Amino acid sequence: MIRRTLWLFALPAVLFVLAGCGPRTQPAENFTESPPELFESGTHQAFFNNLASLCGQSFKGEQVYRSHHGESWAGRDMIMYVTVCEDDHIYIPFHVDDDHSRTWMFTAEEEGLRFRHQHLHEDGTHEDGSMYGGYADDNGTAFVQYFPADEYTAGVIEDGGGNLWTVSVDEEFTTFSYRLDRDGEKRFEIVFDLTNPLVN
C-alpha cells in the first residue's frame, strides 16, 4: 500500500519531466508579435508593413500637380481612410468631396504586391473599368513602390498600358503621395499630410 501511494505521488513529476523532453512550441500569442512574411521581395514586405502602420487613421490631401490632360482637382476635399488592414490586404477608401466611390487596394498575391483601383456605383456594383492597376516592380524601397499597368488595365483604359503609379510614404512619415505617370510623362499627384490625422 505504501509503495502504491508513493508511486501515485511520483507519477505527476514523471509526466512533467517527460513533457519537458518533447518538442518545444512557441506560445500562440507570440506569433502576432511581427507581421507575417507575405512577399519574396523584402522591399515589398517592408512597404506593406509601413502602410499597415497607418491603419485606423485618415488624412487630408491636396493636389500638387495636374497636367493639361485631365480635370484639375485643385481645391477639392480629398481624404484617404486607412480603414481595412488584414494580413494579406490593405484597403484605403479615397473620397473626393462627396464622391465615395474610390478605394485603393494593396493585396498580397502569388505574383507579388498588387495595387488596384476599385470604383463602385452607389448600389455597390463595379463601374466599367474598375479594378485597374498593376504589380509592384523591383525598383522600389520600403518607402516607395512603382506599379506599372497590367494587361487588364491596358484593355480597359485608353492608352492605359503606359500608366505607372508611384505610391510613397516619406521616411519621416510626414507625407503620403499618390502619383500617376503615363508613357514617362507626369500626369497627376496628390500628397496627404500624415502629421495631422483627422478625427473620424
Image (cartoon, helix red, strand yellow):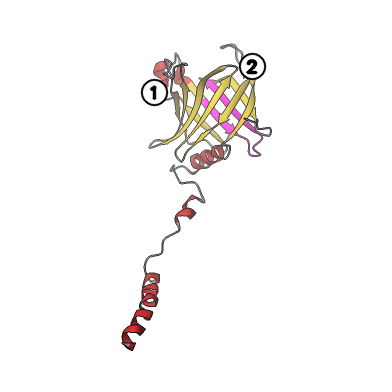
| Res 15 seen here | yes
Relative vertical location of residue 172 with respect to residue 188 in this rendering, above or below: below
Q: Which mark is residue 151?
A: 1
Q: Toward the viewer: 185 or 52?
A: 52
Residue under the point 46% across and 46% down: 36
Specify few, some or many for label 2: CA neighbours under 10 Å numbering under 14, 14-19, or 20 or more: few
Q: What residue type is labelled 1?
A: Glu
- Of badges 2 and 1, nearer the viewer stands 2
Residue under the point 44% across and 27% down: 134
**Magenta-span inclusion, residue 137:** no
Write down the region rendered in magenta: 165-184
Residue 20 image-quadrant placement: bottom left
Mark closer to the chain start, 2 or 1: 2
Quarter of the rendering occupied by the C terminus: top right
Relative vertical location of residue 139 with respect to residue 120 in this rendering, above or below: below
Residue 111 image-quadrant placement: top left
**Percent of width and height locating residue 198:** 65, 30
Residue under the point 57% across and 24% down: 179
**Percent of width and height locating residue 22:** 36, 68
Give the farthest residue toward the right: 196
Dot 2: what SS? loop
Quarter of the rendering occupied by the N terminus: bottom left
Dot 1: what SS? helix
Q: Is residue 151 left or right of residue 44?
A: left
Q: What residue type is labelled 2?
A: Arg
Gap in Å between the C-alphas at discs 2 and 1? Answer: 32 Å
Residue 65 image-quadrant placement: top right
Residue under the point 34% across and 79% down: 8
Q: Toward the viewer: 90 or 143?
A: 90
Q: Name the residue under label 2.
A: 76
Q: Toward the viewer: 80 or 163?
A: 80
